[in-house]
Image (cartoon, helix red, strand yellow):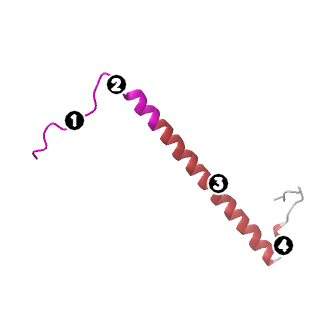
């Protein structure tokens, strides 16, 4: 891995605190990527559903009405 300055970080040469920070940062990055992918997929599903709903509507058909509630 490399740090933001472009220097190579060797995991084996890190002390205990450095290893903990390295692993914690990696876990946070993976979690953030997973959340980002989930949000993007949910947004895509919402957009696709909205588009399908709008394309499927027929302006000549009225909304559903309850005709009889005796059940």
Crowd class of label 4 (few under 14; some 14 to 19; many from 20; radius 10 Å): few
Which numbered disc, 2 or 4, marks the residue that appears first in the sequence? 4
Residue 5 covered by magenta stretch: no
Q: Nearer the viewer, mark 4 or mark 1?
A: 1
Q: Specify the label residue 37 is tagged with.
A: none
Cβ atoms under marks 4 and 3 closer than 8 Å: no
Q: Nearer the viewer, mark 3 or mark 1?
A: 1
Cβ atoms under marks 1 and 2 closer than 8 Å: no
Q: Which residues are magenta?
A: 49-71
Q: Nearer the viewer, mark 2 or mark 4?
A: 2
CA–CA distance between discs 3 and 1?
46 Å
CA–CA distance between discs 4 and 3?
25 Å
Q: Specify the label residue 65 is tagged with.
A: 1
Residue 8 lies left or right of residue 24; in this view the side is: right
Q: Which residue is mark 4?
A: 14
Cβ atoms under marks 2 and 4 closer than 8 Å: no
Q: Which residue is depicted at the point 46% across and 32% down?
A: 51
Q: Nearer the viewer, mark 4 or mark 3?
A: 3
Relative to 39, residue 31 above or below: below
Q: Which residue is mark 2?
A: 58
Crowd class of label 3 (few under 14; some 14 to 19; many from 20; radius 10 Å): few
Q: Which residue is depicted at the point 65% across and 54% down?
A: 33
């Amino acid at each position: 891995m490399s740090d933001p300055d472009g220097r190579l970080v060797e995991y084996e040469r890190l002390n205990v605190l450095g290893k903990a920070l390295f692993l914690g940062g990696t876990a946070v990055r993976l979690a953030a990527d997973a959340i980002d992918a989930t949000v993007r997929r949910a947004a895509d599903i919402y957009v696709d559903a909205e588009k399908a709903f709008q394309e499927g509507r027929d302006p000549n058909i009225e909304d559903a009405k309850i005709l009889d509630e005796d059940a």
